[in-house]
Amino acid sequence: MSSMDNLKNAFAGESQANRKYLAFAKKAEEEGFKQVANLFRAAAEAETVHAHNHLRVMGGVKSTKENIQEAIGGETFEFTKMYPQMIEEARKGGNKQAQQSFEFANKVEKIHAELYQKALNNLGKNETVDYYVCQVCGNTVENAAPDKCPICGASKSMFIKIG
């Protein structure tokens, strides 16, 4: 295997470890284990450092314009090809929880592509926009959280402000 293949695999592994450790931290916090939650968060941050290093060495971070264009492509692939197939397979297999998880993600990936396109169209205008993310389905909205999430029905209180 080439160094580039190893970098791609290491990037994927470190990225997954980051997200997994943050989920573990959330659970530890819920169970009252604050110190363990902090350890999971520290390890997650270290995994992010590793992932960013690998991505940089691979040449995966370009100009902001190029990065937005890549993000649009990735999000578009997810909502047009990847998730529709996964939704259908989950439906056929009778796994309603997986199907719902995929459906939530599919709807939100389309929103992400639209938000990235808007950002690309406005690049350089330095407009300030607040983003809010639903902690149930991941719905991402601009300027203010809705009273009720249009994707999953969660209340306004389930949205967190980013930035």
Image (cartoon, helix red, strand yellow):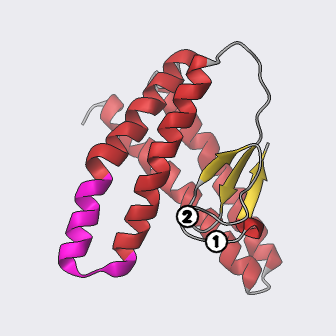
Q: Which quadrant: the N terminus?
A: top left
- Residue at the spot 74% in from the left edge and 66% down from the top edge: 156
Residue numbers of the magenta segment: 83-97
Task: Answer above or below: position of 75 versus 28.
Answer: above
- Residue at the spot 26% in from the left edge and 46% down from the top edge: 81
The three-letter code of the residue at mark 1 reads Ala
Q: Is residue 59 left or right of residue 38?
A: left
Q: Earlier in the sequence, mark 2 or mark 1?
A: 2
Q: Position of residue 64 (x, y in %)?
A: 59, 19
Q: 12 or 146, which lies in front?
A: 146
Q: Which quadrant: the C terminus?
A: top right
Residue 144 seen in render: yes
Q: Is residue 85 magenta?
A: yes
Q: Which residue is mark 1?
A: 154
Q: Is residue 37 left or right of residue 112?
A: right
Q: Is residue 107 left or right of residue 95?
A: right
Q: Position of residue 104 (x, y in %)?
A: 46, 62
Q: Quadrant of residue 152?
A: bottom right
Q: Is residue 80 left or right of residue 56?
A: left
Residue most extreme to the left: 92
- Residue at the spot 58% in from the left edge and 42% down from the top edge: 50
Q: Position of residue 30 (x, y in %)?
A: 74, 82
Question: How many residues crowd around disc 2 within 10 Å: few (fewer than 14), some, or many (20 or more)?
Answer: many
The three-letter code of the residue at mark 2 reads Cys
- Cα gap from disc 2 to disc 1, whole angstroms: 8 Å
Question: How many residues crowd around disc 1 within 10 Å: few (fewer than 14), some, or many (20 or more)?
Answer: some
Q: Which residue is mark 2?
A: 137
Task: Answer above or below: position of 40 versus 160.
Answer: below
Q: 105 or 3, which lies in front?
A: 105
